[in-house]
Amino acid sequence: MAEVPQEQINSQHGGKPHFFNQTPVSGSSGPQERDAKAPLPKGVVLDKDGKPCRTCTSMSSWRALTKQARAEPAASSTSSSTSTASTVPLAAPATPSSSSIPADCPPDVEELGRSTWTLLHSMAATYPEKADTKQQEDMGGFLKLFAKLYPCWVCADDFQSWMAHPSGRNKPKLGGRSEFGWWMCEAHNEVNRKLGKKEFDCRFWEERWRTGWKDGRCD
């Protein structure tokens, strides 16, 4: 759950990020009330109601949308008071570099994804070494609800689809900590592959998320 790859952006909802990607603007042209005819900045994902989805969009793309919303009224006013034929760009391109988010601001899709993976890997790390039937049912139920309620709805839909692969290969493995931790690592690597990021060697998932590295850097 992280940054949205551009190839997953579609025209129907503005974007299709893989599972794991405001202060209202004054006036009537904020991100929630923008002109539907104006093209969206690159990377902006729409919610099911057709409005920009903040938790589905990176901070750089959201700021580009906000900048666009602020510029449109000024552009309209300028064009009506001048006879020149010059045109004003409707969409400011998203900045490719990541943008920092103040600690007291809502998370973007990237920060939400990082925080979510920390939670999920930590849950796997503290899962029983051998889980009984009730513990397996509880974790399975959590994962199903999590996949439905995750704040980035397109990410949630994608996670549900991944787990429900017809072959059954992605079904959560809940027999015990070892297999569950490995399954979680594979789920995370699926995201890494889609984003073109380096995959994590799942042989070391316990050192990364449970015991700490053997070189003592975590002690």
Image (tube, grey):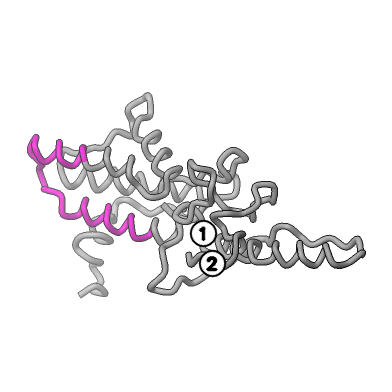
Q: What residue type is labelled 2?
A: Ser
Labels 2 and 1: the sequence-earlier one: 1
Depth check: 147 or 168 in front? 147
Tell me where residue 155 sits by quadrant: top left
Q: Is 167 situated above or below 77?
A: above
Q: Distance between the residues labelled 2 and 1?
A: 8 Å
Q: Is 73 situated above or below 15?
A: below
Depth check: 195 or 8 in front? 8
Q: Which amino acid does label 1 sit on?
A: Ser
Residue placed under numbered mark 2 in the picture:
98
Image location of residue 127, percent across then percent down? 15, 49
Tell me where residue 69 sits by quadrant: bottom right
Depth check: 81 or 149 in front? 81
Check whether the beta carbons of the residues at disc 2 and disc 1 lie within 8 A of each other: yes
Q: Is the magenta stretch mostly helix, strand or loop?
A: helix
Residue placed under numbered mark 1 in the picture:
58
- Badge 2 element: loop
Query: What's the residue at 42%, 69% (across, down)?
Result: 105
Which quadrant: the C terminus?
Answer: bottom left
> Does the magenta-highlighted stretch encompass residue 15?
no
Query: What's the residue at 28%, 61% (across, down)?
Result: 208
Q: What stretch is highlighted in magenta?
A: 114-141
> Does the magenta-highlighted stretch encompass residue 117?
yes
Depth check: 207 or 85 in front? 85
Image location of residue 170, percent across then percent down? 33, 34
How many labels, in total? 2
